[in-house]
Image (cartoon, rainbow, N blue to C red):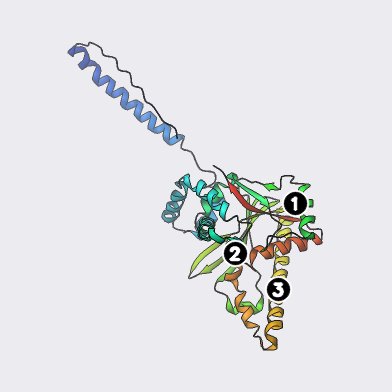
Amino acid sequence: MAVWKRSIMKKLFKISPLIFASIVPVAMVACQKEENKSEVKKIEIKKTDPFENNQYIKKLVSTYISADSNLSDQYIANQNNTLDAKYNELKYAMNFFPPYYINAENHASDFLNLVIKSKKIIVDTLLQDWYWYLKNIDKSTYLFNPYGDSYSDDDDTEALVNSVKQKFPSLILKTNSNIKNLIELDWQQVPETRQYNKFSNHKVLYLVFDNNVVMKAFSYTQDNTQKFVLMPDLLYIDKPITNNPELLQALKAIEDEFYNQRVLEIKKAIDYNKAVDGDDYDVNESYKFYNDEQLSKLFNTEAYAQLIQNTVEALFAKNEKVYRFTWRSINE
């Protein structure tokens, strides 16, 4: 912590009362003029925040915080005044709940309470403090993540790691807060699960940091309130993309495969339950379980983390390379 020291020097002059009286008014006028000039200069050099004025950030704030400028300005002010202690809080949290290891609670043992608290800190940041998180994203590091729900290796894992090392030898990806595009796509729903959904107005958002680096979010309406959930990943699309149509095509390919993997996941669950309970098993139990809330909840099993990994592997098999990097650390 910096300690500031102020040194004040005073000089005393012997001035006659007459001379002093003649000097004071002139000095006061001069000071007043200087103050006015200073005020004008302050107005002229007032700085703007490029992040706050980013058109896509403005859209996110007006849509998911408030269209009322007073309320949105208050939210932004609170986010900008977030204490530096938050960095240390997140560093601490990621030691006990690294976002790439979503099953940490099942292996926490004596540290279960710390893991649960750490997970909440990370979830709250992504859900509530997303403005601060995105504004300071250049201070975050994302680690290549070839894992889904389980933290185990297989042949596909080794192939993915070897491939990504050719472009990212350190297996690390970083980006900056300059969001260059915001792309909205349909959140594809498995028809049989629709009746069990908790939300409406389903959309998928992709925040574009450059043509190859994107971040996914789920958008929906709950209790007449627009909400969105940032996923803790950066996706790197490993092919030349020079314009928006090419980017849109790549994102649609990801979403189509993601949907296919969701269908397969539900089918596997139904087949398993039928094998255990017989033909009397009510398949609607599975459709009810795999609803929109289950899919979009952060760090949920049998949901986004496993599906995005299955998607990456399926695309890789088609020689459509997309690499997933998960939030790993943060520094001031």
Q: CA distance from mark 3 to mark 1?
A: 29 Å
**Looking at the image, which residue is at 71% across and 45% down?**
170
Observer-nearest of 215 and 280? 280
Quarter of the image containing the C terminus? top right
**Looking at the image, which residue is at 73% across and 66% down?**
257
Observer-nearest of 328 and 294? 328
Compared to residue 332, the image places residue 157 above or below, namely below
**Residue 54 makes an appearance in the image:** no
**In front: mark 2 or mark 1?**
2
* Residue neighbourhood size for the residue with mark 1, other residues' Cα within 10 Å, grouped as few (<14), some (14–19), many (≥20): some
**Looking at the image, which residue is at 64% across and 50% down?**
142
**Residue, far front:** 110
Mark nearer the N terminus (2 vs 1)? 2
Residue 86 is situated, as x and y percent measured from the top left of the image, at: 49, 48
**Looking at the image, which residue is at 25% across and 16% down?**
23
The circle drawn on residue 289 is none
Q: What amino acid is labelled 3 in the image?
A: Val
Observer-nearest of 199 and 276? 276
Residue 212 is situated, as x and y percent measured from the top left of the image, at: 71, 51
Q: CA distance from mark 2 to mark 1?
A: 40 Å
Mark nearer the N terminus (3 vs 1)? 1
Mark nearer the N terminus (3 vs 2)? 2
**In front: mark 3 or mark 2?**
2
The circle drawn on residue 241 is 1
In the rendered image, which residue does mark 2 sit on?
106
Q: What amino acid is labelled 1 in the image?
A: Ile
Q: Secondary structure at mark 1?
A: loop
Q: Secondary structure at mark 3?
A: helix
Q: Is residue 277 left or right of residue 230?
A: right
Q: What amino acid is labelled 2 in the image?
A: Asn
The reply to whether callout 3 and callout 1 are in contact (CB within 8 Å) is no
Residue 312 is situated, as x and y percent measured from the top left of the image, at: 73, 60
